[in-house]
Amino acid sequence: MDKKNLSIKEIAEISGVSVATVSRVINQNGRFSKETEKKVLEVIKSNNYKTNLVAKSLRMQQTNTIGVIVPDIKNEFFASIVSEIEEYFFEEENYTVFICNSNGEKGKELDYLASLDSKGVDGLIYISGYDDTLHTSVRRNIPVVCIDRKPKENKEIAIIESDNLEGGYQATSLLIEKGCENIVVLKSEKETSTNIDRFEGYRKAIEEYNMSLNEELIINLKKTHFDYAKDAINKLLEKNIKFDGIFAVNDWLALGALYSLKDNNFKISEDVKIVGFDNVSISKYSYPNITTINQNKKLMGRTAAKTLLDLINNKQTKNNIHIKLPINKIYRGTT
Ligand code: RIB
């Protein structure tokens, strides 16, 4: 029969000490005798008393839990990464993973950071949906690994990202090498590092091929969602602005542009070529399927997880780890 999950009060009664003493033993705050500590820990171990503090009292100073903050769990890109992290920690390292979906809202990110901090998580993997990171709000000195979006100033935390600049550069170069002369870039108005770097890659390619930047073709969107891209391309067509190539900073934007062009009877690739970013499943199953820049989501998730575990095990909080994972082109029907 499962042992009853005892309360700290019941542990105190069985041990014949006060609740305050049990708490001091659990927190290893001292002011108790060796035999009291032995007795209390025996009662804790022989009963089903689960709390992060028990783990801590066993001098592991750990709770074997981590927190993951993600801006949009519905987005396949983030979901793929988070499931890698969860699988690694739960199945290979016997950790519990708290997954917090912030919807990219600053207030929610702060609330989740505070809640994970109070749960005593041993470390944090943080994908900010806001245009900077808020990990400094975590009170305890725990290791933090940022994925995908970099903090504006690096506060000695680990960063795992794709080579976004190279990805933007390769996407745009591909379009130019396919004969495109007027290339639209669909990007976010948010100043996230991924967005800034991909646009930098676009700009670098335009410059290197001796083309000039045309402000009319640089589209800053409120949200990097399908509808925003579709509307933006519709507007360019209504204004009769000429273009023959589109670089979209993620695959959903590429799909939105694709739908706009198809609705307006353009032939994809013959009339306008499109390159996306991420290589999520919509790029593979759309018609035509979308040429895109692959981000290695599995590797990103596992690299972040292993980096965090090393930092936890080495009790190292401050670090300047910065891992940039290679990207690669996936050629499909839109080019
Ligand atoms: O689809 C989500 C996008 O935002 C991805 O490109 C990812 O890199 C993130 O920055």
Image: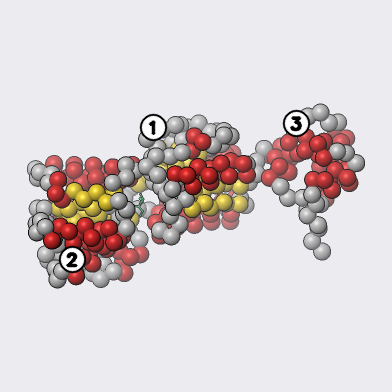
Q: Earlier in the sequence, mark 1 or mark 3?
A: 3
Q: Residue furthest top?
A: 31
Q: Quadrant of residue 312?
A: top right
| Viewer can see residue 274 | no
CB of residue at label 1: within 8 Å of ligand 1?
no
Q: Which residue, given by chain and number where applicable, does mark 3 sit on?
A: 29
Q: CA distance from mark 3 to mark 2?
A: 67 Å
Where disc 1 sits, the SS reads loop
At a point 27% along the width and 63% down the height, the residue shown is 255
Give the quadrant of the C terminus: bottom left
Label 2 residue SS: helix
Alpha-carbon span between mark 1 and mark 3: 36 Å
**Which mark lies nearer to you, 3 or 2?**
2
Sequence-wise, the earlier of marks 2 and 1 is 1
The amino acid beneath tag 1 is: Glu
Beta carbon at label 3 within 8 Å of ligand 1: no
Near-viewer residue (248 or 326): 248
Residue labelled with disc 2: 261
Tell me which label, 3 or 2, sits earlier in the chain.
3
Kindly tell me whether residue 106 is visible in this rendering.
Answer: yes
Q: Residue 253: image x %, image y %? A: 28, 58
Disc 3 element: loop
**Residue at image mark 1:** 153
